[in-house]
């Protein structure tokens, strides 16, 4: 009663029992928040992470199911397809040591080539009756399922760890990253559907631009899964490179550029076309330009191109088409496809501005060429 009396006196309302009850509830709420508030917040955050984890698992399982169905339709037995899909989703490429960065690019290039060759041979052994186009598509479909599996494993790890240790800060960090994580997962699910049906994706806009320039002209393979053509417009000689379609390929643009520049000693200009990630608030399909090798990836192909143009002192320009990560790996939208002709015209304008009426220009269309022929 002494504590209650003191509270009532402090409030100046000894005669009002409701004020006492109200103040007592406030004190109790304060004590609950002070003592158990973080645990309550942790519980709420973990529930949201668990819900997101369930959605990622559903997407991963759906992508895996699409890959298994694709392999089955291509002549592989269901049990064999499931076993291979499970193995593929745990397949990793171990990065080379980088304590001494000298020579790391050739090591990465070698590991990527070995990995790519192994996967191709395994899928060819499972599906001997189908062509390269379908094999490339199912390979990329498996890659999408694998990436979803990696996201699922990573989020699950931090979810279980933060739950087991009641670590509020780790859970808070994963919770803060959930919007980006879910955006990436949804984009990969869109990619899985695109690879399943062989639809072109946003990242293929560079290949589409090159295909516009190559269409109807004689082509030859200058590097693995990479095509080349040569033609003239007036006194300007165009050398065009793109990955081989319409199967899912990114080719070896670095090797192709190296081969072409060795054979054509006098190249006045290199123009690269690729998709680029836009920032929030920017419009999809906007075109911007820059100086340098416009190509993504881990850097192996970019390094090769930069080495060749630097050695020969050739100016290199990049034309970038803006899009979100989801648009880049999901089926190509009309907004993105409509930029192809605009980019072709811009290439001709750059050639005229930088070279005049004669010379040789090398155009490299970068990107996954699924659904894009030549």
Image: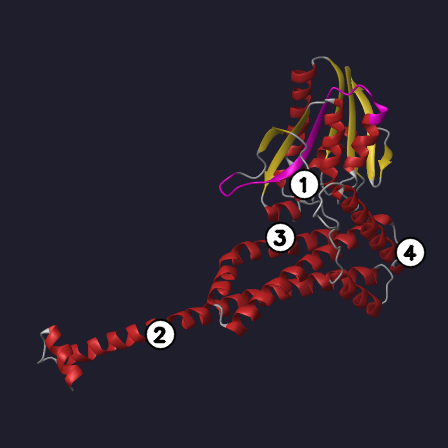
Locate the N terminus by quadrant.
Answer: bottom left
Q: Nearer the viewer, residue 79 or 90?
A: 90
Q: Nearer the viewer, residue 302 or 121?
A: 302
Is label 1 or label 4 in front? 1
Left or right of residue 311, residue 354 in this image? left
Q: CA distance from mark 3 to mark 1?
A: 17 Å
* Residue at x 50%, y 43% (from the top left corner): 280
Q: Is residue 113 above or below residue 340?
A: below
Q: Which residues are magenta?
A: 262-282
Is label 4 or label 3 in front? 3
Q: CA distance from mark 1 to mark 4?
A: 34 Å
Residue 190, image x, y percentages: 65, 53
Marking on residue 129: 4
Residue 70, image x, y percentages: 79, 59
Mark 2 vs 4, N-terminal side: 2
Residue 117, image x, y percentages: 85, 50
Mark 4 vs 3, N-terminal side: 4
Q: Residues within 10 Å of mark 1 (few under 14, many from 20)?
A: some
Mark 1 vs 4, N-terminal side: 4
Task: Verify CB contact (< 8 Å) between mark 1 and mark 2.
Answer: no
Mark 3 lies on residue: 187
Task: Verify CB contact (< 8 Å) between mark 3 and mark 1.
Answer: no
Q: Residues within 10 Å of mark 3 (few under 14, many from 20)?
A: many
Mark 1 lies on residue: 296
């Amino acid at each position: 009663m002494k504590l209650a009396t003191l509270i009532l006196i402090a409030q100046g309302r000894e005669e009002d029992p409701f004020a006492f009850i109200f103040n007592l509830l406030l004190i109790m709420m304060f004590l609950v928040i002070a003592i158990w508030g973080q645990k309550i917040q942790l519980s709420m955050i973990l529930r949201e992470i668990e819900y997101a984890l369930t959605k990622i698992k559903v997407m991963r399982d759906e992508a895996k199911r699409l890959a298994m169905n694709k392999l089955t339709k291509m002549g592989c037995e269901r049990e064999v397809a499931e076993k291979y899909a499970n193995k593929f989703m745990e397949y990793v490429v171990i990065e080379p040591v980088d304590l001494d960065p000298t020579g790391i690019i050739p090591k990465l290039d070698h590991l990527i080539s070995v990995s790519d060759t192994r996967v191709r041979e395994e899928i060819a052994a499972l599906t001997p009756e189908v062509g390269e186009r379908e094999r490339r598509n199912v390979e990329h479909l498996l890659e999408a399922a694998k990436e979803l599996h990696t996201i699922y494993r990573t989020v699950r790890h931090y979810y279980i760890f933060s739950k087991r240790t009641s670590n509020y800060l780790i859970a808070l960090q994963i919770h803060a990253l959930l919007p980006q994580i879910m955006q990436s997962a949804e984009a990969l699910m869109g990619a899985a559907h695109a690879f399943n049906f062989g639809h072109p994706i946003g990242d293929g806009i560079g290949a589409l631009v090159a295909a516009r320039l190559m269409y109807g002209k004689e082509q030859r393979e200058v590097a693995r899964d990479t095509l080349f053509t040569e033609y003239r417009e007036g006194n300007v000689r165009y050398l065009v490179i793109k990955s081989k379609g319409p199967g899912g390929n990114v080719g070896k643009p670095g090797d192709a550029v190296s081969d072409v520049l060795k054979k054509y000693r006098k190249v006045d200009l290199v123009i690269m076309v690729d998709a680029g990630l836009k920032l929030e608030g920017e419009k999809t399909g906007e075109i911007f330009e820059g100086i340098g090798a416009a190509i993504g990836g881990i850097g192996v192909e970019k390094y090769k191109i930069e080495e060749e143009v630097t050695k020969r002192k050739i100016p290199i320009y990049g034309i970038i088409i803006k899009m979100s990560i989801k648009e880049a790996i999901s089926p190509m939208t009309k907004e993105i496809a409509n930029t192809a002709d605009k980019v072709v015209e811009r290439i001709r304008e750059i050639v005229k501005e930088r070279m005049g009426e004669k010379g040789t220009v090398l155009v490299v269309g970068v990107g996954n060429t699924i659904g894009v022929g030549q």
